[in-house]
């Protein structure tokens, strides 16, 4: 049993750490304040090969897998969760295609993600169907060998920048609760009837647009169906494999917030000493540092499990633990770090209020903390996670 990253991952970690510190950190505040998509950072990520991390080598990627992307996102998220989200979107929409897509689909849609020629977004949630995925009402009706898709997807990150969308729709009645009535489709941006709808005004993670995708009678050929008709399980497998990648955003944010607060405390005089000299402050730092390391161990294990293909039901508790613990820690650490600075932490003179706002997104996206707790609890009850 080894707890150190292999040499190639340590090299990746060091290079992304340097890139994040030198290029991402100076842009973080501007991205948040303007809300403009940081094309310069996307171009930088492409040049550095970071958009190809999760793509297999035979599809033009580096083959670093979910662990590689987790390591990279952790470093970027120390300074900007918007930039980290850009990297996450190299895997989320491509996941179902990598898991169940045909070789032709993988060549057509995944390879351009690796090279940065295309971007994509993931369409699962709807206004009335967030955690209740089966409540979606987007429908796909057969028309000859084609499918006609109609409905609205919401909360889609990267919706305006995407060249194509991974969309889940009901191939049965819109009000059906049958898991077998949900299937996965690739929908290109330029197809007639595809429109970007309302863009959300978010409290954090600004710079990467989140909003609606409106499908108005969009004709999609049969070759754009991913896997089999009745692909609800594919949606869950795709999300299961993403848990450590989302967790990495939480770990990075928690580290960034704590590191900033500690450096500030070391320089801040108070009562003839520095703030960092007080035992109460050091105990809080120790608590958060311990939880960060615990979250990292959970997350790296989850990433390795996902890379080994162990993201089916029996492994869900381990994957969900990483996402739940790391993202809740991001909220805790950013809040505690802000408190360490007192009134100064509440101002835009320091990045902690940005960390605090960004952290709140993480406990909601790709399965809320409550969803993760439900999955973990069910896993224990079903003995998928058991100690005897």
Image (spheres, rainbow, N blue to C red):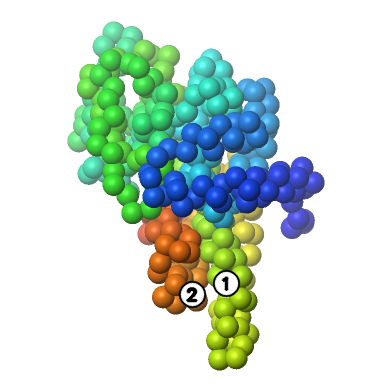
Residue 262 placed where, x, y %? 60, 72
Q: Against 232, is 187 above or below?
A: above
Which residue carries the number 2 mark?
341
Residue toward you, 319 or 65 = 65
**How many residues crowd mark 2 within 10 Å: few (<14), some (14–19), many (20+)?**
many
- The residue at 58%/62% (across/down) is 255
Q: Do the residues labelled 2 and 1 touch (CB within 8 Å)?
A: yes
Identify the disc placed on residue 264: 1
Farthest-out residue, top: 144
Going 32% across and 12% down the picture, which residue do you hit? 146
Label 1, residues with CA under 10 Å away: few <14, some 14-19, many ≥20: some
- Counting every numbered tag in the picture gives 2
Which circle marks residue 154 in the picture?
none
**Quadrant of the image containing the C terminus:** bottom right
The residue depicted at 67 percent of the width and 33 percent of the height is 63
Up the image or down, 247 lies above or below 235; here it is below
Does residue 283 show up? no
Q: What element carries label 1?
A: helix
The residue shown at (22%, 22%) is 216
Q: Which percent across, then down, holds residue 26?
A: 55, 50
> Residue 254 vs residue 360: left or right?
right
Quarter holding residue 210: top left
């Amino acid at each position: 049993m080894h707890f150190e990253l292999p040499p190639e991952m340590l090299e990746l970690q060091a290079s992304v750490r340097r890139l994040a510190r030198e290029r991402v950190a100076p842009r973080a505040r501007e991205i948040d304040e303007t809300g403009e998509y940081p094309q310069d950072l996307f171009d930088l990520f492409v040049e550095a090969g970071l958009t190809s991390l999760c793509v297999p080598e035979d599809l033009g990627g580096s083959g670093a897998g979910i662990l590689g992307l987790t390591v990279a996102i952790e470093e970027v998220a120390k300074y900007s969760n918007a930039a980290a989200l850009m990297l996450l979107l190299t895997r989320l929409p491509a996941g179902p295609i990598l898991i169940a897509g045909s070789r032709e689909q993988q060549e057509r849609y995944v390879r351009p993600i690796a090279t940065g020629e295309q971007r994509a977004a993931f369409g699962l949630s709807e206004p009335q169907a967030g955690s209740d995925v089966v409540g979606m009402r987007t429908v796909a009706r057969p028309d000859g060998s084609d499918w006609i898709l109609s409905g609205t997807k919401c909360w889609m990150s990267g919706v305006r920048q995407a060249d194509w969308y991974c969309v889940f729709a009901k191939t049965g009645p819109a009000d059906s609760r049958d898991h077998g009535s949900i299937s996965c489709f690739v929908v290109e941006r330029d197809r007639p009837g595809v429109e970007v709808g309302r863009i959300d005004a978010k409290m954090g993670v600004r710079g990467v647009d989140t909003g609606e995708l409106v499908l108005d009678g969009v004709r999609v050929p049969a070759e754009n169906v991913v896997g089999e008709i009745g692909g609800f399980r594919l949606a869950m497998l795709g999300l299961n494999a993403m848990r450590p990648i989302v967790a990495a955003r939480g770990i990075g944010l928690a580290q960034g917030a704590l590191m900033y607060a500690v450096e500030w405390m070391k320089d801040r005089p108070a009562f003839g000493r520095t703030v960092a000299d007080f035992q109460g402050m050091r105990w809080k730092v120790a608590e958060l540092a311990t939880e960060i390391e615990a979250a990292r161990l959970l997350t790296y294990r989850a990433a390795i499990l996902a890379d080994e293909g162990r993201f089916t039901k029996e492994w869900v508790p381990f994957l969900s633990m990483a996402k739940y613990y790391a993202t809740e820690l991001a909220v805790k650490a950013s809040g505690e770090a802000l408190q360490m600075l007192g009134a100064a932490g509440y101002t835009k003179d320091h990045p902690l209020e940005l960390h605090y706002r960004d952290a709140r997104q993480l406990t909601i996206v790709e399965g809320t903390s409550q969803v993760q707790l439900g999955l973990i609890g069910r896993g224990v009850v079903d003995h998928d996670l058991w100690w005897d």
